[in-house]
Every structure is written in structure tokens, then in C-alpha cells.
Image (cartoon, helix red, strand yellow):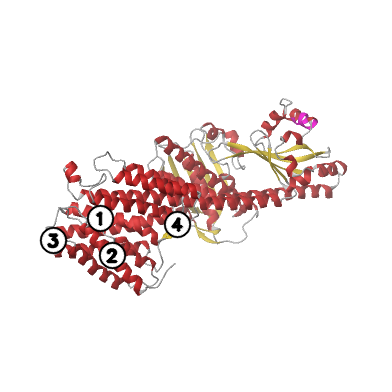
Amino acid sequence: MFTRPRPLLIVGVLTLLVAFGLAAVVSTPVGGRGIGIWPVALATAPLMVTSRPATGWWLALLSLLAVGTIWIGGRPAEVAVGLGLGLAAEVGVTWRIACEGRRERAALLTLPDLSRFLVAVTAGALTMATAAVLTSLATGWGDPLLLALTTGAASLGSQLALLPFFCRFRNHPPIAGPVERGAQWALLIVVTVLVFVPTDFPSLVLLVLPALAWGAMRAGSYESMAQMAMAVGISLPFTTWGHGPFARPDLKFGVPVDLQGILLATFAIVCALVVLFLRLTVGEQLENARQVGAERDRLRNVVDGITSVAIIGADTTAKITLFNPGAEQLLGYAAEEILGQSTRVLHSDRQVSAKAAELGVADEFSVVAQHLLGGGVTEMGFVRKDGEERQHWMSLNPVTDDRGTLLGYVSTSEDITDRLEAEARLRESLETERQAVERLREVDRVKDAFVSSVSHELRTPITSILGYTELLEEGVLGPLPAAQADAIDRIGRNSHRLLRLISELLTLSKIQEATTLADGEVVDLTQVVTAGLAVLSPTVARRDVELTVEMPASPVSVTGDRDMLERVIINLADNAVKFTPDGGQVTVALTSSSGQAVLEVVDTGIGVPAHEQQRLFDRFFRSSLAQQQAIPGSGLGLSIARKIVEQHGGTLEVRSEAGKGSTFRVSLPAAA
């Protein structure tokens, strides 16, 4: 929350700046050329928390104060001027980038926020380092590069350790209880003191990091930041007094004395980064867990709201874990009395035997269930609690996680007993047949709505998974061993595949709602082709496939939906690239003649066997060659493309030969 400047508060900040600034300069070791860890974060804080900061006046006042403390601390006047102006410039740069030039506090709510914050403080530190180089060159004070490294590292350490306190945090309550937090504080204090009290004992400085990580993962946001600041605060006086692993490296190792400040600043930087990354990661995980819980509750409401369809879930041992109100209504059991029982109780021996005979498999329930798994909708007998046998249209599908691990099973079914009896009695009645068809269509609409709802509900957690996967792949959260990196890559690829499948299901649902195009606009196909291929450019870049585009210089106009036509381009070109081995060629050619716009996508890929080409545009169909070579895909792309083309009054044809490639030809009426 922003505040307006208060005179007493400003005086207090200035007093602290003078005190800590002088202490920083004076505490530098004898012979050092730096200015210690000058409190630049404290100088930046007023700009971060004030609603209408007088930036120019504050930076001018800060310049005078910084020059004064550096000069009084024992540095030559010309050096004090150069470094003091550098500190003021650093404050301005850090504030400008962190707050993006707006009158609002910088946020540290997400990892992208942290990235922007790190860019801001790094840019500020580089500004200070540049000022140090220029000052050294102009005055001959110290080695330019060493002075730049000393002052830049000190500034970065100060900003990282203290400036987050003045940013907007998502302050989740602590996960740990009071006893655990007390133990964590005690451990951190003891470890930090033990690290920095000895003078000749081998360094144990890395022991501080696990203690800080413990707090970052289990304590609240500001509490973990306070622990980090305390650890850094303990290290400063002990190092100044000659204790700890960083004190007087010139005497221990014969290196420049200014390395003491660099090592101390590096310790502060590492501590701050560990706490910030872990705190924000844990915070985002807690927030995502809350959102996933909310999504799960909404999905549960959808499932519970479908009272005409029985939705039954089971674990990997066939024990019932989900029994929705529709199942209660259709089968007569209350959820609490059926949960935990085997799904076998829902089917009689006669029904299982009849289905086994129909499928031609062994007369065992587990064998029948295995053959029904993922096989689409089928007729299956169920037994109600009162013993009455009913016939259902049922589909049985596996439930897996994003890595393909089997979690259980889910079946959806509708009681069709009454309809079957009506069909048997009134087989010759057209009206009865019409009603039966209408009921089937209603079932399809309910299932389509369910699939669409589930697809929408899955987008948010999958997007979150992809975000964290990209962070791990890019090394933002630290380096990964090769095995873990490979696992993360597999997670990312499968998440992208699932996201594409959801998108295709939603697109297919949309285009199935209408058989023709309701409205359209005049669209230039050259622009549509360019836009579609731009979407695929990352995919093409990852493959050793030559992509050739042939388009006329003049527009090729048709009447239609731009987004839908772009989907056709993407689906056809993506298939061509996907099914073409490395070293192959894909050609996309657009022409116009005789009142027709013609788009051809030609590849030198694996092709399609002749006997399978008539099924190529069926939903979920995948050729035998694609399955043999384990090329991923949903089997929806071509079905969607043909449906869109037909809605635009056009045709989609294919010519293909196994092992030699395919040509897909789209013909659309040119715009009048």
C-alpha cells in the first residue's frame, strides 16, 4: 500500500542512510578501495512505497548524502563525487525498471515478477559498476575492474537482501506450526554464528543455505525474508571484526583485500536468491493448489449436476471411488453404501457371460472389462440394488496423469432399458424410432457438453504445468541432472499434446454445431497462409525439413471465417511437417483460376496406404504407418479441416502413396 511522504519518516530514513552509509565505508578493511555494502536498498525504498515520489529532488538529495558519507568515511573528494553520483543513478535505474515507471509498488507475486525485479536490481548494480569504472579511470583510484566488481556486487547484495521488503508479496500464512518455526529460527541463528565466529576453521558457510531454504518453504513470506536479512546481518559485523570465512582474504590467500567485500556481497546475493526463488515457488504452488481445488470443486458440481447419466469412477483395483447422483438415481444405491466396493457388484453373472460371448473372450469380469476399456460406447447390463437388471449404453475409459501413469477408470452410462423395450414393441412405428434417435442425440449433446466442460476445466492446470516445466527447462530454478531434464522434457511434450487435443476437441465441437457457414467476410488467403505458417514456424525450426511457400503477389480472395481457414492451413501444414522425415521437403502452394482458390500442401513424408485413404478424414483415425512409427497425434486434424472446408462450400482431396508422400488439395469458391 502506498503512503504519502512524512517529514519525520524522511528524516529517519536520512539518518539511517547517514549512519549505515558511514559504517559501510569505515568498516572496509585497511587498504581497500571500495565503500562496503552501502545501504542503497534503503535509499531506493522511499521511491518504492511513496504514492507521489519527488524523484528528482530525492535523487539530488541522495547524491549529496552519498558523496558526504563516502568523503567523510575517508575517500578522496573526487572519488566520493563519482561513487556518490553512481549510487544515486543506481537508485533511479532500479526504481524505474522495477516499478515500470508507474506510481505503484513493484510486485513479487510470481516468478515473472521476480525476473523483472532481478533485471531491475542487476541493471542498477551495473550502473553503479559503470560509475566505479569511470571514477577509477578519471581519478586513478584503485583498479577499475576490481572497484567495479566490489561496488557492483555490494549494491546488488544490498538490493536483493532488503528491497523485497518494500515490494508487494503474496503473503501466504506459514505452513509450519509455532514449534517448527521456533526450531528453524534457532537453527538458523546457531548455524550462522558458528559459520562466522571462527577465524581459521574450515568454512561451513553452505550450512546456512539449508536453514534458509527450510524457512523459505515452511514459514510465511515476510518471515522467511526476515530470516535471510538476519543471516546477512550477522555476517556483516563478524566479517568486519576479522571473523568468518570471508575476513581478510589478503592475509589468508594473498589476494586483493577488496575481495572481502565481494565475498560478503556474494553471500548476501546467494542467500537472497535462494529465499526469493523458493518463497515465490512455494507461494505459486500454494496458489495453484487453491485454484486446482476450486477447479476440482467446479468439475464435481458439473458431474453431480448430470442426473440422467451414471458416472462411476474406480481405482486401479476396480474399487468404486466416484458415484454421482445420476448413478444413484439409475442404480438405486446411495454413494456412501457403494463406495469402496468392487464394480463387479453392479453386473450379474448372466450379464457378464453374455458380454463375454459377444466379445469372444473368456467368461471373466476382469477380461471383459479390459476389452471394453477405451472401446467406445457399448451396451452393457447393470443390476440395480433391488435386483432388477437394466441395460445401459456405457463407455469405459482409463484415467491417467500427465506422465501416462494409470490412476483408475471412469465409466459413463445411460439406462436404455425402456428405449429397448419400446423399440421391441413399436419397431414399425416411425414416431417411436424418431424419439429413440432424438434421445440418442440428446445423449450425444450431454456427452459433448461434458467433454467441452472438462476440456475448459483442464486448461488452467495444464497451463500452470507448462509454465513450471519451462522454468525448469530454462534453469531458472537451478540446473537439472540429465535424467531429470529428460523427464521434464517428456512432461512438457505430453502437456503440449494434451493441450492441443483439448483445443482440437473444442474446435470440433464448435464446427459440429453448424453444417454451413452462417456469416463470412472477404478474406485474402495469402494473408491467412502467411499467418498459419507463422504459427508453425517453431515446429518447423525444430525439424530438418525444407519448407517451400509458393504464393501469387496479388490477393486471393474468398468469403469465409479467417480463423477457421487459418486452422485448415495449420492442420494440413503441421501434418505435412510431422509425417515428413528429416531431410524431406514440404511445399505449400496457393493459386487462383477459374473462379476457384486452390491450396496444395505437398510433402515427401511416409504417405498413407491406399486402402486406408477412404478413412483418412474420419474422426480419431490414424494410419497404420503413423502408428507403427509412433508418431503422436489425435486423429482429429484432417476431420476438422475437411469439415471447415465443406462449410465454406469447398472440397478437400488427398493423393498419397505409402513411402513417397502425400498431396492435400483444398478448393474454395473465389469471392465474387
Mark closest to the chain's N terminus, 1 or 4: 4
The reply to whether discs 4 and 3 touch (Cβ–Cβ < 8 Å) is no
At 40% from the left edge and 45% from the top edge, which residue is drawn? 187
Q: Position of residue 309 (x, y in %)?
A: 73, 47
Q: 213 or 504: nearer the eye?
A: 213
The reply to whether discs 1 and 3 touch (Cβ–Cβ < 8 Å) is no
At 48% from the left edge and 46% from the top edge, which residue is drawn? 573
Q: Amino acid at mark 1?
A: Gly
Q: CA distance from mark 1 to mark 4?
A: 26 Å
Q: Amino acid at mark 3?
A: Ala
Query: What is the magenta range?
Result: 350-355
Q: Position of residue 531 (x, y in %)?
A: 46, 54
Q: 93 or 396: nearer the eye?
A: 93
- The relative height of residue 69 versus residue 229 in the rendered view (above or below) is below
Q: Which residue is mark 1?
A: 152
Mark closest to the chain's N terminus, 2 or 4: 2
Q: Which mark's residue is nearer the viewer, 3 or 2?
A: 2
Q: CA distance from mark 4 to mark 3?
A: 42 Å
- The relative height of residue 522 versus residue 573 in the rendered view (above or below) is below
Mark closest to the chain's N terminus, 1 or 3: 3
Q: Which mark's residue is nearer the viewer, 2 or 4?
A: 2
Q: Which residue is mark 4?
A: 109
Q: Which residue is mark 3?
A: 138
Mark closest to the chain's N terminus, 4 or 3: 4
Q: Which residue is mark 2?
A: 17
Residue 106 seen in this snapshot: yes
